[in-house]
């Protein structure tokens, strides 16, 4: 039994909620450094404040993926309950963020906002695979990427547009400007409305229908079977790696955020040890053994793509939390977050972010499908990653902030490819019954590099480039080149 083909209206309804989710992410990415610095944070504080965002993704996405695979709430379906719950919490966080009067409140709300966005976002990745035939996966993820791009344009442009319409872009010390305040409120309303549209206009396939669609798939090993064959020494290697990281941090006086990375390594080792013992003892399946077992038994193509994701998202996270201070300092000559020049730089970053997202929306529907059909998904993704590396490198030769628009063209092509190509490859290669958990686990390799950047980049900058954040973009360019080289190891069935 084969799934029916979706027309363009069906493809749009399936992914329209991502338009709203990305408005939330765009507001977060373009404005949180600005909000933190307005509330008194220094450049050295930004990495650990931003660490909250990827940490929530690391904890939330595999859990939501595992749960959504096993959920069925009748007419509400499998993935849509998570869309709705996450959107409601995210909209509430966006409404409350402008009321932050202290750094701690803003950090807690960022944590809540990112967790909520991840609750909605993770099932959307699996939702495309659930609803579409394999020969429509590339088109489905291209449409999703287009909505991501358009949503990010809208979210990024909010403060800049409000400034041009006469809304106050400056405020007293420690007060969030009205341009940012009103943008977050409008973004919250748009986010919830867009997700609600997808919930109302789509109907998920029942478990019986999904079983019929997947009848010809090869059965995959259970998570518990994967765990039972694992070497019990593996978890102790993770624990020792975490302990060594703590020792190095203490001995060399690295930034305190590195302790978070060490704690995560130790935590994963302990959880793996417990899960292996439970599986070998023949205990009933649980969420713990399911998540750890599926992580241990990832398909080979997913492991190879994971390395590509690791490098790709390291570069993106560097861009998101450093672009505002870089543009303000190197192109507007401002380092004081309360100065008019700094706020002008922050608004221009919103414009730049809207440009790369607009380019991504166009590239996803036009350039990438054309290249993929002619050269294959692997070479297309390599091309996109190298365009992004060139965009980051150009920050070192451009002097006029207006010309940074050219830089964003390369970044936009890379962003479109990062959002579409890996997921199109995976959705056609993974067992449908585990699409949610595997998509959630795949996003671990989106989150871990962000945590690594948030914890380690501060120490690198403090040691080698104090007060000169533009050098972080050199790291971003290098990691995208590394991602393109790693992509060469990915073998897609049917491609040379």
Image (cartoon, grey):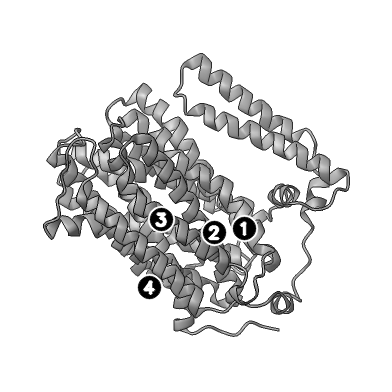
> Label 3: which residue?
92
Asked whether the residues under the numbered discs 3 and 4 touch, taking CB atoms below 8 Å apart as contact, a structural biologist would say no
Does the CB distance between marks 2 and 1 fall below 8 Å?
yes
Q: Which mark is residue 122?
A: 2
For marks 4 and 2, the one nearer the N-term is 2
Above or below for 116 versus 171: below
Q: Secondary structure at mark 3?
A: helix
Q: Quadrant of residue 345?
A: top left
How far apart marks 4 and 2 lie (CA) works out to: 25 Å
Mark 4 residue element: loop
Q: Residues within 10 Å of mark 1 (few under 14, many from 20)?
A: many
- Name which residue lies at 25% across and 56% down: 182
Residue position for label 1: 65
Quote the CA–CA distance across marks 3 and 1: 23 Å
The quarter of the image holding the N terminus is bottom right
Q: Is residue 329 left or right of residue 155?
A: left
Task: Tell which tag, 3 or 1, sits nearer the viewer.
Answer: 3
Vertical position of residue 428 compared to residue 25: above or below = below
CA distance for labels 2 and 1: 7 Å
Per the model, the C-alpha gap separating discs 2 and 3 is: 19 Å
- Label 3 packing within 10 angstroms: few (<14), some (14-19), many (20+): some
């Amino acid at each position: 039994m084969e799934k029916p083909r979706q027309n363009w209206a069906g493809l749009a309804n399936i992914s329209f909620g991502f338009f709203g989710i990305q408005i939330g992410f765009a507001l977060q990415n373009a404005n949180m450094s600005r909000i933190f610095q307005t509330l008194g944070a220094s450049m050295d504080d930004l990495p650990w404040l931003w660490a909250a965002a990827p940490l929530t993704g690391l904890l939330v996405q595999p859990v939501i993926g595992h749960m959504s695979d096993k959920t069925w709430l009748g007419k509400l379906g499998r993935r849509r309950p998570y869309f709705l719950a996450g959107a409601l919490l995210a909209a509430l966080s966006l409404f409350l963020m402008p009321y932050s009067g202290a750094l701690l409140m803003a950090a807690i709300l960022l944590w809540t906002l990112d967790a909520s966005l991840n609750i909605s976002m993770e099932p959307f990745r699996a939702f495309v695979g659930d609803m579409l035939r394999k020969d429509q996966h590339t088109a489905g993820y291209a449409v999703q990427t287009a909505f991501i791009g358009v949503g990010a344009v809208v979210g990024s442009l909010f403060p800049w547009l409000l400034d041009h319409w006469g809304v106050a872009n400056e405020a007293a010390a420690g007060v969030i400007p009205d341009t940012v305040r009103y943008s977050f409120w409008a973004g919250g309303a748009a986010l919830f409305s867009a997700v609600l549209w997808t919930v109302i206009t789509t109907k998920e396939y029942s478990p019986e229908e999904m079983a019929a669609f997947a009848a010809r798939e090869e059965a995959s090993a259970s998570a518990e079977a994967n765990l039972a064959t694992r070497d019990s020494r593996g978890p102790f290697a993770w624990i020792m790696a975490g302990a060594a990281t703590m020792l190095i941090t203490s001995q060399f006086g690295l930034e305190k955020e590195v302790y978070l990375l060490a704690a995560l390594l130790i935590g994963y080792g302990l959880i793996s040890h417990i899960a292996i013992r439970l599986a070998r003892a023949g205990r009933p399946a649980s969420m713990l053994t399911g998540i750890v077992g599926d992580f241990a038994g990832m398909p080979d193509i997913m492991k190879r793509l994971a390395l590509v994701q690791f490098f790709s998202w390291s570069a993106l996270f560097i861009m998101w939390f450093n672009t505002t201070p870089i543009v303000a300092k190197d192109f507007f000559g401002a380092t004081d977050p309360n100065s008019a020049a700094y706020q002008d730089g922050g608004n221009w970053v919103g414009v730049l972010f809207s440009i790369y997202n607009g380019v991504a929306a166009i590239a996803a529907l036009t350039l990438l499908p054309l290249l993929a059909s002619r050269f294959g998904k692997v070479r297309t993704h390599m091309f996109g990653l190298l365009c992004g590396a060139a965009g980051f490198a150009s920050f070192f030769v451009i002097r006029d902030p207006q010309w940074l628009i050219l830089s964003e063209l390369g970044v936009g092509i890379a962003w479109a490819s990062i959002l579409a190509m890996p997921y199109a490859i995976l959705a056609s290669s993974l067992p449908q019954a585990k699409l949610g958990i595997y998509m959630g686990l795949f996003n671990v390799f989106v989150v871990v590099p962000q945590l690594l950047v948030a914890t380690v980049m501060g120490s690198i900058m403090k040691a080698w480039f104090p007060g000169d954040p533009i050098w972080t973009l050199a790291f971003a360019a290098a990691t995208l080149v590394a991602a393109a080289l790693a992509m060469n190891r990915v073998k897609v069935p049917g491609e040379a």
